[in-house]
Image (tube, rainbow, N blue to C red):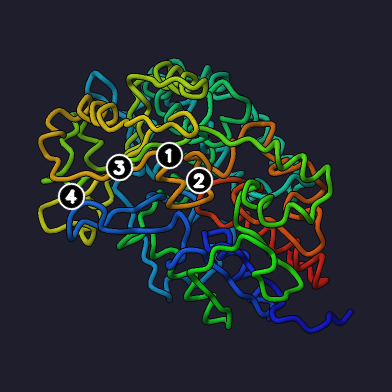
Amino acid sequence: MKLEKRDYDAIVVGSGPNGLAAAILLQQQGLSVLIIEGKDVIGGGLSSAELTLPGFMHDVCSAIHPMALASPFFRTLPLKEYGLEYLQPVLAAAHPFDDGTAAILDHSIEKTAECLGNDAKTYISLMENLITTWPLIDEDALGPLHFPKHPLAMAGFGLKALSSATGFVKRFKEKHARGLFAGMAAHAIQPLSNLSTTAIGLVLMASGHLKGWPIPKGGSKFIAEALAGYFKSLGGKIETGTFITSLNQLPSAHAVLFDITPKQLLQIAGHKFSSIYKWQLERYRYGMGVFKVDWALDGPIPFTAEACRSAGTIHLGNTFEEIAAGEMMTSKGQQADQPFVLLAQQSLFDPSRAPEGKQTAWAYCHVPNGSKQDMTALIENQVERFAPGFKDRILAKHTMNTEQMEAHNRNYIGGDINGGILDLGQLFTRPALRWSPYKTAAKGLYICSSSTPPGGGVHGMCGYNAAKRVLKDIFKLKIR
């Protein structure tokens, strides 16, 4: 079937990792693709800037990228040829406790297990099975609900992944393994008692053992720049500085893919949708927000636990019970006095991020959606708790509350960096219950953001899967 002539075969609105992934896959098939980005720079959450002092380069949003190297799509792209270099910390992550000890996530399963005491054998058995299985199921697990290529392997993973972290952690008896898993599962940004929170923890740990938790040299913006460079090398076009608020602003195209959340999609194209689809989008649920702090430091963070001085990511929250209680409070609109804090220290492994002898640090905690509370003191207290003397090393700081996060990236509704809560009710039915979650109720209009499966993270799989749907529906091309 020959399609009538349009200005472009496809247009992608938004240049986050999912928008870029969608555009690349479409352009790879010989189509003409235009990306339209509202801001003057591309990348969405992939941005870096001197937020504190000259010479200190901070990641504005995403920082450490466990899923970037593990992404089934991104790993097929020649991004190194376009300036992207990943650096691997000595340890992917560390989780300190009040007694001065720490659990770690090392590339080696055995080295990770060494700090887990009587839970070591349980951990080794669990992870050896998972990293054997994961390469068989990663593309199915990071896609829409469908019949998998390896159903038995997928079922084995799913039975564990769909459980709550609170239930799953019972297989561990001591605080080190329980705390380590709590920090991993808390990336789900929801109560750890929710079903499916185990999935996030397992995937992050498997990624750490298989590919590590890499840091892009120079800043997260270089991931976006490499993706864009490759896209343009294929003949793709990018226009910046135009926020799309109406379909009338768009050139003609056979398909339009929106790297935005349901809230913006309704504003732009709601009048084109069926009443049932519009009803579902209006009831889409957003999750907890984040409050973020960046610091310019006079030296490394003086963690009591030596392992923390060699880790790219630090999870600050002590025990499973403390983290679970804090996340539950926050989900109910309250704020814990000792919040779970995710901290990254990129400059320890990337000297280009700070002047010689200085360091940067990046951290956030979860807050109620839309909260304007200043969490700086509580976050700094948590760091000081595990690293006495930290506050004395602060040269300057930069903070962002939920309102400022959303102002920076309109997809972060109320500070929600996951594009909507990723609980069981929205795990596979985000943003609506449909045969294909990427296809809207209007012909030729698709959604490819983290508000579709598999959700948040720098992996591009939402965009990749949406583009596959477009190729099949509009251009009658099937990508295996």
Nearer to the camera, 105 or 217: 217
Mark 4 / mark 3, whichever is N-terminal: 4
Under tag 4, what secondary structure? strand
The image shows residue 228 at horizontal and vertical percentages of: 49, 72
**Label 3 neighbourhood size at 10 Å, few (<14), some (14-19), many (20+)?**
some
Relative image position of residue 414 (x, y in whole percent): 50, 39
Residue 412 got which mark?
2
Q: Which residue: 47% across, 40% down?
A: 415
| Mark 4: amino acid | Gln
Which residue corresponds to mark 1?
402
Which disc, if any, is residue 139?
A: none
Residue 278 percent across, percent down from the top left: 77, 45
Kindly report the distance in space between the C-alpha atoms of the residues bearing marks 1 and 3.
10 Å
Q: Earlier in the sequence, mark 1 or mark 2?
A: 1
Label 1: few (<14), some or many (≥20) within 10 Å?
A: many
- On screen, residue 61 above or below 304: below
Dot 1 and dot 3 residues touching (CB under 8 Å)? no
Q: Position of residue 72 (x, y in %)?
A: 59, 58
Q: Which one is nearer the viewer's eye here, 462 or 271? A: 271
Query: Helix or strand or loop: what does disc 1 sit on?
Result: helix
Camera-near label (4 vs 1) is 1
Where disc 2 sits, the SS reads loop
Name the residue at 18% across, 39% down. Answer: 301
Q: Are marks 1 and 2 in contact (CB under 8 Å)?
A: yes
The image's mark for residue 359 is 4
The answer to which of 63 and 302 lies nearer the viewer is 63
- Give the mark nearer the N terminus: 4 vs 1: 4
Instruction: Kindly identify the residue that appears in the image at 18 percent across and 48 percent down.
Output: 296
Which residue is found at the position 79% from the left and 45% from the top? 277
